[in-house]
Image (cartoon, rainbow, N blue to C red):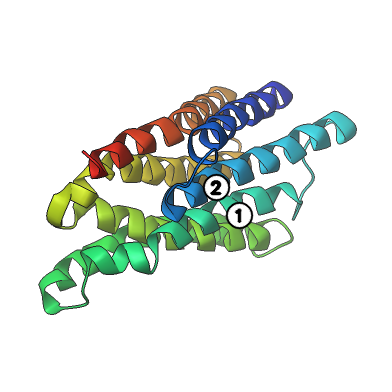
Amino acid sequence: MYLYLSLALTICAGIGFGYGLYRFFRDESALYVRMIVFAVGCAMLGRLFETLLILVNGGLTNGFHVGMLGIIGCFMFLFSANFGQMDSIVDDGSKKFLKTRLISFAAPLVIAAIWVFIAVTKGLNETTIPLGVEALFIAQASYFHLKHLIIEDVSFGLIKAIRSYNLLSLVYAVLCMTEMLVKSFNIPVFVIVIVNVLQCVVLLVFVPVLERGVKKWTT
């Protein structure tokens, strides 16, 4: 079952990545969009490694494995796309947005709380420490996704146009952490099936939803 789920995630991420390459790499496109396409590509590579690992070993190994770098790379690209220029467009650092900045910490705090629960329950070991590194990158990205989801819009509807994408990114972050939680405990199998199926859907629609929002920037 884990083999089929991992293969499905690889295929869905591959379709999303391929679509992004086709739509945004044939001509000049915004770096913001391309970084998100690369994020989906990283997710694909991570899941591909997990699929091959299951085929060779019969299951995923405890502790760190290269497939984790796929998820880490995915959220590094999502974080990098929002950090810096994009964020400075919507937040000038003034007190006006202080409340928004504070509320946005709710997302990384939830991510951190999930990992802390796993670490306290299972202890710090070869599995929970790498999961903590993974959670760190997920938490960093989630801060900006929540922030750009709730912050006041700027001229030309820049933020409103990509709110659906930021919502999807938050959902994906929660799903990744839920998968981490499910795999750490003896939770019924159907839960991981639901979580992975939802991840498949998100990876498929990531780029199309972003594309629809980006088109609004130029109309």
Residue 20 versus residue 8: which sits nearer the camera? 20
| In this rendering, position of residue 50 left or right of residue 143 | right
Give the residue number, with chain letter if any, for mark 2. Answer: 39
Outermost front residue: 27
Q: Residue at x 42, y 51 (%)?
A: 30
| In this rendering, position of residue 98 left or right of residue 26 | left
Q: Residues within 10 Å of mark 2 (few under 14, many from 20)?
A: many
**Residue 85's x, y, as percent?**
35, 67
Outermost bottom residue: 94
Q: Residue at x 79, y 45 (%)?
A: 61
Q: Is residue 174 above or below residue 99?
A: above
Q: Amino acid at mark 2?
A: Ala
Give the residue number, with chain letter if any, for mark 1. Answer: 73
Q: Are marks 2 and 1 in contact (CB under 8 Å)?
A: yes
Earlier residue among tags 2 and 1: 2
**Residue 158's x, y, as percent?**
22, 50
Quadrant showing the N terminus: top right
Quadrant showing the C terminus: top left
**Residue 63's x, y, as percent?**
75, 54
Quarter of image, res 134: bottom right
Q: Is residue 74 above or below residue 116?
A: above
Quarter of image, res 16: top right
Q: Residue at x 60, y 55 (%)?
A: 72
Secondary-structure class at tag 2? helix
